[in-house]
Amino acid sequence: MIRSYHCVVTGKVQGVFFRAWVSDQAAALKLGGWTRNLDEGKVEVLMQGDETNIAEMRTRLLVGPPLSQVKDLKCEWIDYDTEHKAFEIR
């Protein structure tokens, strides 16, 4: 199992290029993982990599890209069955 950081972002986070922005930010921080849209307008993010970079990504998720409005961010450390070297949009 790979120690991973899992987040669910709520607010105006769909239709504002949020997932593309997350992917760009994660690549800049050298994080692996993925992001995808969920029902009810939420976005899910799974990150793997250096804990300092994950903490920075969490801070960035609270702000989001210019067109978004992040209302809530729920994150937790989980054990995940797959290791991701790159970051992908699902």
Image (spheres, grey):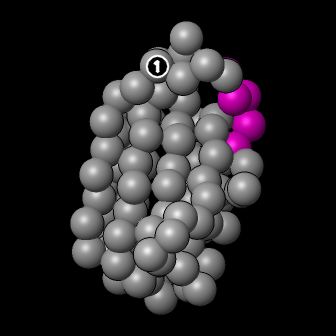
Furthest toward the front, the residue is: 39
Comparing 25 with 8, the one in front is: 8
**Relative to 10, 26 lies left or right:** right
Q: Position of residue 53 (x, y in %)?
A: 44, 36
Residue 39 to residue 17: above or below: above
Which of these two is toward me, 2 or 62? 2
Of the 4 image quadrants, the one containing the N terminus is: top right
Residue 4 x %, y %: 47, 27
Q: Which residue is mark 1?
A: 79
Residue 30 visible in the shown view: no
Crowd band around label 1 with a 10 angstrom C-alpha radius: few (<14), some (14–19), many (20+): few
Question: Is 62 on the left-hand or right-hand side of 15?
Answer: left
Q: Is residue 13 magenta?
A: no
Secondary structure beneath dot 1 equals: strand
Residue 74 coordinates in the image, percent (x, y): 28, 52
Main secondary structure found in the magenta portion: loop
The magenta stretch spans which residues? Answer: 83-87
Q: Is 81 placed above or below 31 here? A: above
Residue under the image location 50 percent in, 55 percent down: 44
Single out the residue that lies furthest toward the top.
1
Q: What residue lies at 73% left-to-right and 49% top-to-bottom?
A: 88
What's the residue at 72%, 56% (across, down)?
90
Residue at 25% across / 66% down in the picture? Answer: 72
- Observer able to see residue 47: yes
Report how many numbered discs are placed on residues in the image: 1
Q: Amino acid type of disc 1?
A: Asp
